[in-house]
Image (cartoon, rainbow, N blue to C red):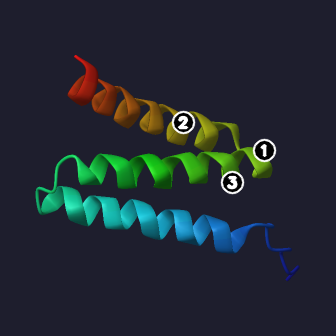
Amino acid sequence: MKRLKPKPHQFWAWCSTATILLGAITAALGYYPLYCYIFLIGNSSLAIVSWLWNEKSLVALNTGLALIYLVGLINLYFV
């Protein structure tokens, strides 16, 4: 069996994933708007890692989610 070469930036991807999980925990506990900031950081950083990996579907997913949280924060503070 051929051994797969690991993707670069794995540590950054795992940190981003942990951040998104932390955001889910804070959302479940009702810490609004804190969880929006946490999700924004986690999804933005995972979008960057996905772009470095050239994974277009993950770039679209994480960029879209980050924009949703950004719009929610803009709506909270400016509308």
The tag on residue 63 is 2
Quadrant in which the C terminus appears: top left
Residue at point 62%, 65% (across, down) = 13
Cα distance between the residues tagged 2 and 3: 11 Å
Question: Could you say whether the residue bearing mark 1 is in a helix, strand or loop?
Answer: loop
Q: For the residue marked with disc 2, what is the amino acid?
A: Thr
Residue at point 78%, 44% (across, down) = 54
Q: Of the residues under marks 2 and 1, which one precedes in the sequence?
A: 1
The tag on residue 46 is none
Residue at point 43%, 46% (across, down) = 40
Cα distance between the residues tagged 2 and 1: 14 Å
Q: Position of residue 3 (x, y in %)?
A: 85, 81
Mark 1 or 3: the one toward you: 3
Please indicate whether residue 41 sits to the left or right of residue 36 in the image: right
Label 1 crowd bin: few (<14), some (14–19), many (20+), radius 10 Å? few
Label 1 belongs to which residue?
A: 54
Q: Is residue 47 above or below residue 22?
A: above
Cα distance between the residues tagged 1 and 3: 9 Å
Label 3 belongs to which residue?
A: 49
Label 3 crowd bin: few (<14), some (14–19), many (20+), radius 10 Å? many
Q: Of the residues under marks 2 and 3, which one precedes in the sequence?
A: 3
Q: For the residue marked with disc 1, what is the amino acid?
A: Asn
